[in-house]
Image (tube, grey):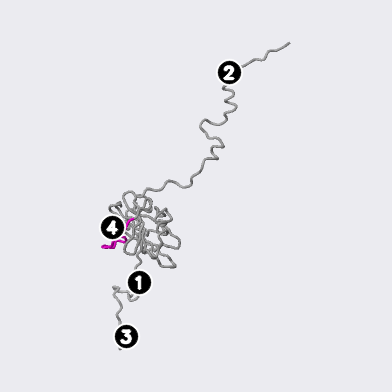
Amino acid sequence: MIRHARVLPVLVLAPLLLTACGSEKAGDPGPSASASAPASAAGPAAAPGTGELASRARAMGVAPELVYVTEAPGFTLAQQSVGVLGDDGFSATWVDGKTNALLRLAVDRGTITAGTCPERPVGDMSGEHTTCERDGGAWYRTGAGRHEYALPEEGHVLRVSAETDAVPRDVLRAAALAAHRPDAAETDGLLPSAEPAPSTPVERGDLPPFGDGAPDNHVDVGG
C-alpha cells in the first residue's frame, strides 16, 4: 500500500525553522561582528574645567583651558619657567640641552587676523617692526631677531617663539603644530601640585628643655 507523505502547512514550518536556526537572541551581534568591532581603551577627554589639570592650573592663577604642552627633538621643559601670562594665560619654555636654545610656548586670550598680526611685536618687544606670513592655518611672524608661529584657537591664541638664529623655522613650526592639551601624565610633569608644601618647624639648638624656653645666652668666664 502506498502511503502519501503528509505536507505541513507553511505557517507551521516557519516558526519551526526559526527556532532551529535562530539560537541567538534578537539584537545580539554574531561572532564576526564582535570580532571586527574595534575596542577603544581610552575614555573621553576630561573637560578643561575639571580634574587634576584644572585644580593645578587654578592654583597658579592660570585658566585651565589655556594650558598646553608641546615637544621638539632635543628640547626639555624648564620647570621653573612654567607660570601665568597676563591675567590668566599660560607660558612655559623648553631648552635644548646641547645648544641652550630656548623654545617658548605662550597661550593668551584674544585672536589674530591679517589686520592685527603686525600690531603685536614678536616676543612682546615694543617698538619693533613685525612681518606676518600666512602658513596654512597659522601665522609665521618675524621681528627683533625672533620668529614665531601663532595659531588662532577658539577664544585664544597659541604662540611658539624662539631666536631666529637659534631655532630653525621648520623646528619652530613642528613644535607649534605639536602643541596640544596635556594628558594626566603630561599634567603631572608640567604643572606644580595644587597642594601646599608641608611646613616643617625649625628646630633651634639654643632653646633649653626647661624653664620658659628663652634662648640660652650663657657666656663662659672671660667670654
**Circle number at residue 221:** none
Q: Which mark is residue 203?
A: 1
**Magenta residue check for 126:** yes
Which numbered mark, 4 or 1, is in the foreground of this view?
A: 4
What amino acid does circle 3 point to? Answer: Asp
Residue in view at x 30 percent, y 89 percent: 222
- SS at circle 1: loop
Residue 115 place in picture, x, y as percent: 28, 52
Amino acid type shown at disc 1: Glu
Q: Position of residue 27 (x, y in %)?
A: 51, 32
- The answer to which of 54 and 161 lies nearer the viewer is 161
* Up/down of 146 relative to 17, above or below: below
- Rounded to the nearest angstrom, the CA distance separating label 4 from label 3 is 69 Å
**Along the polypeptide, which appears first: circle 3 or circle 1?**
1
Image location (x, y in percent) of residue 116: 28, 53
Q: Does 202 sit above or below residue 20?
A: below
* Quadrant where the image shows the C terminus: bottom left
> Which of disc 2 and disc 4 is earlier in sequence?
2
Pick whichever of labels 4 and 1 is earlier in the sequence.
4
The residue lying furthest to the left in this view is 127
In the picture, the disc for residue 120 is 4
- Nearest to viewer (mark 4 / mark 3): 4
Residue placed most toward the observer, 114 or 109 = 114
Q: Which residue is mark 2?
A: 10
Q: CA distance from mark 2 to mark 1?
A: 97 Å
Q: Position of residue 158 (x, y in %)?
A: 35, 54
Q: Which residue is mark 3?
A: 220
Circle 3 or circle 1, nearest the eye? 1
Q: Which residues are magenta?
A: 118-132
Whole-angstrom CA distance, mark 4 to mark 1, is: 53 Å
Dot 4 or dot 3, earlier in sequence: 4
Q: Looking at this rendering, what residue extends furthest in the right direction? A: 1
